Image: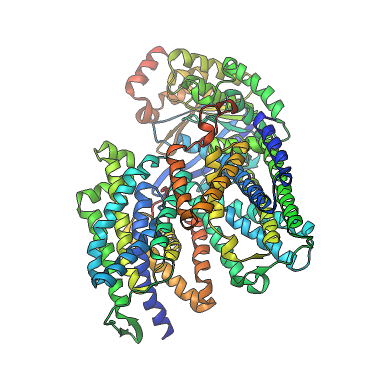
């Protein structure tokens, strides 16, 4: 295991101590931080490892939120609903991936972007199942007060984060990770040496959707009410990319730190500039891309941990 | 007759769609940049028309003349100062960058104009005409003609003007164009400026037909996308073909499975085309 | 001699261009065949069709008894077909070792990364690149990258190896070295088809020569016969060259 990956696990373990340091609001922030980290780490599998710029994160976040939400509304316990949301997202992504990942560059980006629209409209129209545009109410899991609720969901999201991180690290050390790296560097050569690129890409796409879907399920249970435009929001696709760009593509530790840095920035901006917060996000993105395209890890001092892979 | 209604509506709407998409298609085809600000440019153009009409009672038809140079300059500057720095970067970077720029513009519009929907209603209203028993509002009809005129102007520019030929050259083969002495950076900025001007003018026309709000920018962008993928990139004929095809499918689809599904249908179509025929109906393969 | 590759009436069209026209060819085990012809004759297209990079528009390809006409590239790689690219295609960020290890890893199902790296070392040694095994592929010289390409092809334990202009861009010392490697491979029993423009290499190494011109096979046989074939001289070799080798016998 590389040093960076080890540090990542340590970092995540430390976060588990958060409830000792703050009240309900801090825990709420912590839960979102974990959610962002899950999205960034997951995106990194297909965007950083394999080099395919996916904009589909929001599609699977929403899908997972609705799978989880609908199941919970039907009475299934959390312990079943969340894993099913994750597995369901994995399967849908792997299947779609086989078709979509044949596209390169711009075309793949747009196709993945369109998934958000298609999923959103499908959910919107399946009113009987999902409540359509009127939204879906999710029953409260038996709670013992605000603090207990906040702590419970924090640990639930944290748990998904831990599993995600373990998955990502396992992939980076495995034949799958090696293969994805080959695909990113030279897909023609990868095919030529006997790598089944379609299979590998589909699995990567599935993995990138799986935990995002599970996180969606947790999100649905946490906020008790979701509607299509809320969860199928393109920002959920763009933010993980920005986080990955902040922290340095390809590096799991980098993207996780990017997620936390991003959340910090978002909080500061939201608190102080609420009316123009999306504009400020825009400025952040522009500055980042113009001046720090390789993320924070390209700054001096971070070189110790190895160069970030190229964009 | 239902069929005639659908057909006429599709032709009218198709030309409008083509007008919306043509600037987007040009930028994508020439600079290989997917310009996510496009939708916001259109909305900004609509606001311009609305403000000029409300404040100075300038008819939208004249606003076109104001919009074109203003937006051209705006686009030129954005490309030269910002986009050009990342012009050779991969998809991820350019797409996210234009997304960031769009956030800024969109947020600025929401801040200044607020998100509520406005409508530009001409006084006195222009009424409607009947074509083959189909009722078409006159302003929509004139807007369609204007849209066609705009696309024709672009066609002339690309065909007749020297700078237009240079743009086409860059689109066909950037490296060869450089070898021919074309100043590619300058062409990129001009093409982007043109794209912005077309978007702004399209916005002026849209102000007459659709409600104006920053919230509609993604809808316009979505339409532009689909038209480009359906019709093919970088060409006027492609935009027209794609626009009319999209409008036709939406019209027929609406009639058969209800209007709520029309948008979904267009995106499903997008994905299908991307997988089966990414170059669109009239495009050339290899423009990735 | 047993047949290892058989092309039957293979054609390939790219829009208006007929790249391959009704090509029939049999390759036997252990042969070293030179595939020559002018630029644009369809030599690389032939290799692409056999390895599944572009599908044939007509005709069949049989490898080791199996019909591989519609088989995907990665599968043909696993069946024992290997090739080098005219414009080398390394994994640029990987080290030379990992480049070759990748080839060993994915062409042999069931192999682990560690074992693949071990095997990679041996192949690198064979082509003379052990000293560069830790170096990033993008930083190697062209000659080294060509040898790396060869090492990768060998790591796939091919039954049939296509060499696409391995000598392009190399100086004469490097060419001699490459030729020695090819002799060694032939001695080890690998069937080789080499696309080559350097006639001295072809005449040195090949037991048989096949000539393509405008997508068609115009000659196939012993070097002596092919070199004096008037159609071949007309299409490719040129009178001066033919006279020169005629003088030396």
Residue pictured at 59% horizontal, 69% vertical? A124
Residue B68 found in image quarter:
bottom left
* Residue found farthest to the left: B161
Residue pictured at 43% horizontal, 84% vertical? B2
Q: Residue C244: x, y in percent?
A: 36, 16
C156 sits left or right of B239 in the view: right
Count every numbered label the image shows and give the total: 0
Q: Nearer the viewer, residue A22 or A43?
A: A22
In this picture, is C166 found above or below A79? Answer: above
Q: Quadrant of the N terminus of chain C?
A: top right
In this picture, is C59 found above or below C239? Answer: below
A25 sits left or right of B127 in the view: right
Q: Quadrant of the C terminus of chain C?
A: top left
Residue pictured at 27% horizontal, 64% vertical? B150
Residue pictured at 74% horizontal, 49% vertical? A155
Q: Residue A44: x, y in percent?
A: 59, 43
Q: Nearer the viewer, residue C118 or A226?
A: A226
Q: Nearer the viewer, residue C70 or B72?
A: B72
Q: Is residue C158 visible?
A: no
In this picture, is A4 found above or below C58? Answer: above
Residue A95 found in image quarter:
bottom right
Q: Nearer the viewer, residue B18 or A275?
A: A275
Q: Is residue B274 visible?
A: yes
Q: Give the colouring mode of the picture.
A: rainbow
Q: Residue B88: x, y in percent?
A: 40, 40
Residue A70 found in image quarter:
bottom right
C110 sits left or right of B208 in the view: right
Q: Residue A52: x, y in percent?
A: 54, 45
B142 sits left or right of C184 in the view: left
In this picture, is C244 found above or below B238? Answer: above
């Amino acid at each position: 295991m590389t040093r960076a990956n080890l540090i990542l696990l340590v970092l995540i373990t430390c976060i588990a101590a958060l409830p000792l340091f703050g009240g309900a609001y801090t825990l709420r922030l912590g839960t979102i931080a974990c959610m962002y980290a899950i999205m960034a780490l997951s995106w990194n599998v297909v965007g950083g490892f394999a080099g395919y710029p996916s904009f589909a994160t929001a599609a699977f976040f929403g899908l997972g939120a609705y799978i989880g939400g609908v199941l919970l509304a039907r009475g299934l316990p959390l312990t079943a609903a969340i894993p099913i949301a994750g597995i369901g997202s994995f399967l849908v992504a792997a299947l779609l991936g086989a078709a979509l990942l044949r596209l390169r560059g711009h075309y793949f980006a747009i196709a993945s972007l369109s998934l958000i629209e298609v999923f959103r409209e499908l959910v919107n129209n399946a009113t009987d199942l999902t409540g359509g545009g009127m939204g879906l109410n999710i029953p409260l899991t038996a709670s013992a007060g605000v603090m207990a609720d906040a702590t419970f969901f924090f640990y639930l999201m944290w748990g998904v984060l831990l599993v995600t991180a373990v998955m990502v690290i396992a992939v980076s050390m495995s034949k799958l990770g090696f293969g994805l790296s080959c695909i990113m560097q030279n897909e023609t050569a990868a095919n030529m040496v006997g790598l089944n690129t379609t299979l590998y890409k589909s699995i990567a796409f599935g993995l990138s959707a799986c935990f995002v879907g599970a996180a969606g399920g947790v999100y649905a249970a946490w906020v008790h009410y979701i509607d299509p435009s809320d969860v199928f929001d393109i920002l959920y696709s763009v933010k993980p990319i920005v986080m990955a760009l902040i922290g340095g593509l390809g590096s799991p530790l980098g993207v996780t730190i990017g997620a936390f840095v991003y959340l910090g920035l978002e909080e500061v901006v939201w608190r102080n500039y609420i009316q123009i917060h999306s504009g400020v996000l825009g400025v952040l993105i522009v500055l980042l891309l113009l001046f720090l395209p390789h993320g924070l890890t390209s700054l001096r001092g971070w070189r110790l941990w190895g160069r970030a892979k190229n964009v | 007759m239902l069929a005639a209604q659908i057909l006429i509506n599709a032709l009218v709407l198709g030309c409008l769609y083509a007008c919306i998409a043509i600037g987007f298609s040009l930028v994508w085809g020439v600079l290989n940049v997917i310009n996510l600000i496009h939708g916001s440019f259109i909305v900004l153009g609509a606001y311009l028309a609305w403000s000029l009409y409300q404040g100075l009672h300038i008819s939208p038809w004249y606003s076109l003349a104001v919009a074109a140079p203003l937006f051209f300059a705006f686009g030129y500057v954005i490309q030269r100062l910002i986009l050009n720095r990342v012009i050779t970067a991969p998809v991820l970077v350019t797409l996210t960058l234009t997304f960031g720029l769009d956030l800024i513009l969109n947020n600025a519009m929401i801040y200044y104009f607020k998100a509520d929907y406005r409508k530009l209603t001409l006084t006195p209203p222009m009424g409607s005409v009947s074509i083959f028993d189909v009722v078409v509002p006159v302003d929509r009809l004139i807007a369609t003609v204007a849209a066609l005129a705009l696309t024709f102007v672009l066609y002339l520019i690309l065909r007749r003007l020297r700078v237009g030929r240079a743009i086409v050259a860059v689109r066909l083969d950037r490296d060869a164009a450089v070898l021919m002495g074309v100043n590619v950076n300058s062409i990129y900025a001009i093409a982007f400026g043109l794209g912005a001007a077309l978007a702004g003018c399209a916005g002026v026309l849209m102000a007459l037909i659709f409600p104006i709000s920053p919230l509609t920018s993604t809808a316009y962008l979505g339409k532009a996308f689909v038209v480009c993928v359906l019709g093919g990139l970088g060409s006027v004929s492609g935009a027209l073909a794609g626009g009319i095809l999209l409008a036709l499918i939406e019209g027929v689809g609406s009639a058969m499975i209800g209007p709520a599904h029309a948008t979904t249908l267009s995106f499903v179509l997008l994905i299908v085309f991307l997988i089966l025929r990414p170059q669109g109906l009239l495009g050339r393969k290899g423009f990735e | 001699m047993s047949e290892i590759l058989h092309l039957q009436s293979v054609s390939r069209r790219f829009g208006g261009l007929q790249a391959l026209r009704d090509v029939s060819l049999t390759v036997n085990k252990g042969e070293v065949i030179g595939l020559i012809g002018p630029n644009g004759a369809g030599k690389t297209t032939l290799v692409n069709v056999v390895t599944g990079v572009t599908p044939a528009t007509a005709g069949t390809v049989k490898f080791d008894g199996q019909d591989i006409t519609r088989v995907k590239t990665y599968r043909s790689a696993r069946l024992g077909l290997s090739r080098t690219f005219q414009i080398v295609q390394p994994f640029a960020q990987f080290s030379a070792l990992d480049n070759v290890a990748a080839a060993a890893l994915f062409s042999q199902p069931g192999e682990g990364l560690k074992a693949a790296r071990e095997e990679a070392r041996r192949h690198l040694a064979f082509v003379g690149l052990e000293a560069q095994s830790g170096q990033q592929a993008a930083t190697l010289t062209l000659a080294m990258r060509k040898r790396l390409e060869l090492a990768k092809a060998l790591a796939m334990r091919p039954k049939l190896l296509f060499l696409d202009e391995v000598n392009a861009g190399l100086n004469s010392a490097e060419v001699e070295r490459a030729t020695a490697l090819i002799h060694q491979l032939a001695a080890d029993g690998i069937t080789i088809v080499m696309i080559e423009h350097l006639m001295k290499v072809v005449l040195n190494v090949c037991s048989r020569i096949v000539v393509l011109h405008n997508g068609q096979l115009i000659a196939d046989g012993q070097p002596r016969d092919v070199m004096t074939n008037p159609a071949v001289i007309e299409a490719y070799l040129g009178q001066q060259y033919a006279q020169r080798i005629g003088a030396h016998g």
